[in-house]
Image: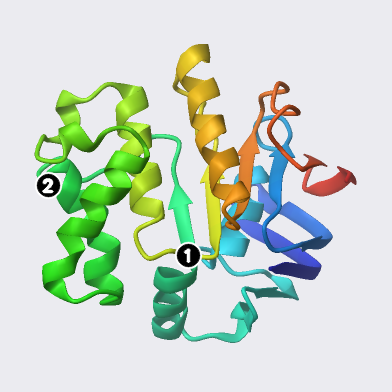
Amino acid sequence: MISLHQVSKTYETPAGKFAALKSIDLNVEAGQFVGIVGKSGSGKSTLLNMVAGIDRPSSGSLAVAGTEIHGLSENKLALWRGRNVGFVFQFFQLLPTLTVAENVMLPMDFAKSLPFRERRKRAVALLERVAVGAHADKLPATLSGGEQQRVAIARALANEPPLVLADEPTGNLDSVTATAILDLFRDMANRGTTVVIATHEADIARVIDRRIEISDGALVNQ
C-alpha cells in the first residue's frame, strides 16, 4: 500500500535549511494498522503529508495505493488523493457553516464518486457507523470534540479509500473518548482499510499491528 524509498524533505527557513525527513525507507502492507510515534517536531506530520500527497519530497520516490505520486501534476494528485486517501486532522477541520452530513458529503462532491441523490444516504450511513447519526443535520459547533472527531472519521471514509491517515487524532480528546476513537480505527483496519496514525501517545500498542518510531526526521525503530 505504501512504499517510500530514500525520501527526504528539506525546508528553507530564515535560519537556513531544515531537514524534516532524512532518507526514509518504509513499506506498509495493505490492511495494516500502523502507529507512527515520536515527539513533537520529530517529522511525524511531514511523513504523513508525504504519503497523502499534501507535500512533495525534496528527493526520493514514493508509491501509494499502486501509484507513484511524486511525479503527478497538482491536478492529477488532487484527483488521486480524493479517491485513495482519507485524512483525519487533529483539529477536525470541519466546515462550520455546513451541517455534519454536508461535511461528510464534501469528498463525494469533489470526487463525484456517487450519483448526487445517493450521497446523503451514504453520509448518514457512515455517521451511523461511527455512532453520530443522530447529529446529521446539526452544525459541527453544537457537537463535542469527540463527536466532531467521529464526523471527521466518517468524512475520511466518504469515498471508501483504501488508505486512511490520521495526524494526532486523539490529541485533543479525553482518555475515554480517545480509546473509543482508536477502537474505531482498529475496526476500520479489521475491515481491510490500511490505517496509519501519527501520535505521541505511548498507549497504542493494544490496537496497532505495527509501531514505527521517528526521531529528528529519521526512522529509529520499526
In the image, residue 39 lies at what x, y percent?
71, 29
Front residue of this view, candidates 102 and 5: 102
Q: Nearer the viewer, mark 1 or mark 2?
A: 1
Q: Secondary structure at mark 1?
A: loop
In the image, residue 218 lies at what x, y percent?
83, 49
Residue at the location (49% across, 30% down)?
Answer: 181
Would you say 71 lies left or right of 134 here?
right
Circle 2: residue type: Leu
Q: Secondary structure at mark 2?
A: loop
Q: Which mark is residue 199?
A: none
Residue at the location (69% across, 63% down)?
Answer: 30
Image quadrant where residue 97 sits: top left
Q: Can you identify the residue that label 1 sits on?
A: 161
Density class for disc 2 (Cα within 10 Å; few <14, some 14-19, many ≥20) is: some
Front residue of this view, candidates 60 and 81: 81
Image quadrant where residue 177 sits: top left
In the image, residue 26 lies at what x, y percent?
81, 61
Residue at the location (61% across, 43% down)?
Answer: 197
Q: Is residue 14 at all visible to an observer of this figure?
A: no
Would you say 112 lies left or right of 6 here?
left
Give the residue furthest to the top.
Answer: 175
Q: Can you identify the residue that label 2 sits on?
A: 98
Question: Across the whole image, how many numbered discs are drawn on residues?
Answer: 2
Circle 1: residue type: Pro
Give the residue furthest to the right.
Answer: 221
Would you say 108 lies left or right of 208 here?
left
Image quadrant where residue 199 sits: top right
Density class for disc 1 (Cα within 10 Å; few <14, some 14-19, many ≥20) is: some
